[in-house]
Amino acid sequence: MRIAGSLRGIALASCLALAFAAVSTAARADATLLNVSYDVTREFYKDYNAAFVRHWKAKTGRTLTVNQSHGGSSKQARAVADGLEADVISMNQASDIDILHARGGLISADWAKRLPNGGVPYTSTTVFLVRQGNPKNIRDWDDLVRPDVKVILPNPKTSGNGRYSYLAAWGYVRENGGDEAKARAFVGRLLNNVPVLDGGGRGATTTFTQRGIGDVLLTFENEVELIENELGKGRFQVVVPSVSIVAENPVAVVDKVVDKRGTRALAQAYLEYMYSPAGQEIVARHNFRPGNAEVFARHKQRFASLRLFTVRKAFGGWTQAQKQHFDDGAILDQLLAAPR
């Protein structure tokens, strides 16, 4: 009887030990995050995610997998609004995050106040990419409305890249003393020179670089070196216009998703690391403009020197710009529908 009792005690102790081990393992189980982002951040997040996974492992002992989804900025935002369960969203304009509050309250209205710099860890700007030798002698925005020039840019209805290009052209006219009527006429002429409107920035890049369509590609500054690395140096060259737009790249935690999945602390840490010196160095290496002034100064030779204006300064912010230019029936639709 004593032996049987001892065996029962051992069995109970073993069960408790196994149960404790299971709880301990569950507490340290592998974690996952989904970052829904826009078209041209694939390579950046490939490096950034790997760095953060190493950082998280060293800090917590936990293994993390970060999954990515990429596409046209507005298309990606709508996918999240329609049910794609992103823990974090990283877009290239604030309106594509604001939509998650407007449609279903997926995110708090004050999301931009929860991280430094209004939730913007890095920026870029719009520049021109031309074929080597610049055969059309393209120097500034005025050259893009010449009848002999074909311009490639993504569709501003679906792409943040396209919207920035559109607003940069509009702002160029205003920055040089033109009124709204002159800006509208100028952008209308530019759109008349666009032979195809791809859905996102990566599609527009393919149209210009691989399909050989167009004389100039409007693209983000950070894309230039990437294109050269992928397709070979010497085939294209960058033209820096006299003035362009600040392309802000905001990030945010998707509140309803992280609260449902229990990943809020992890998602917050993932975005905060982007502001750290280590995260900002990765930003700079991928030719985005770091928000950290010291990191920017160390890498300033990477970035063009030109006059820059913001969407807030030139258009009153993204809400106003969206309503005036990009909503259904707004100026963009009117310009695209006008006879060519």
Image (cartoon, rainbow, N blue to C red):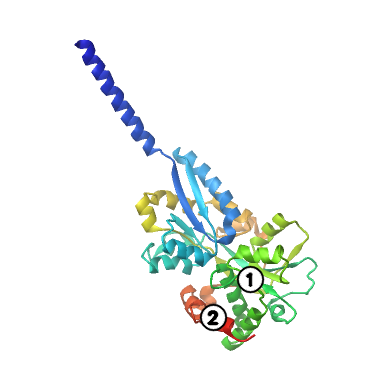
Instruction: Identify the residue at horizontal 44%, vertical 64% (top origin).
Output: 112
- Mark 2, residues whose alpha carbon is within 10 Å: few (<14), some, or many (≥20)? some
Helix, strand or loop at label 1? It is loop
In the picture shown, does residue 197 fall above or below 88?
A: below
Instruction: Identify the residue at horizontal 80%, vertical 72% (top origin).
Output: 135
Q: CA distance from mark 2 to mark 1?
A: 16 Å
Instruction: Identify the residue at horizontal 36%, vertical 49% (top origin).
Output: 262
The residue under label 1 is which amino acid type?
Leu
Nearest to the observer: residue 328 or residue 284 = 328
Residue 173: image location, x then y, percent: 63, 82
Residue 53: image location, x then y, percent: 51, 44
Residue corresponding to mark 2: 333
Residue corresponding to mark 1: 153
* Figure quadrant of residue 170: bottom right
Quadrant of the frame with the N terminus: top left
Q: Earlier in the sequence, mark 2 or mark 1?
A: 1
Q: Which residue ends up furthest to the left in the rendered image?
A: 1
Tell me, yes or no, if residue 48 can be seen here.
yes
* Figure quadrant of residue 97: bottom left
- Mark 1, residues whose alpha carbon is within 10 Å: few (<14), some, or many (≥20)? many
Helix, strand or loop at label 2? It is helix
Nearest to the observer: residue 234 or residue 174 = 234
Q: Which mark is residue 299?
A: none
Quadrant of the frame with the C terminus: bottom right
Residue 309: image location, x then y, percent: 58, 73
Q: Is residue 296 left or right of residue 1?
A: right
Residue 196: image location, x then y, percent: 64, 73
The residue under label 2 is which amino acid type?
Asp
In the picture shown, does residue 219 fall above or below 87?
A: below
Tell me, yes or no, if residue 118 can be seen here.
no
Nearest to the observer: residue 133 or residue 283 = 133
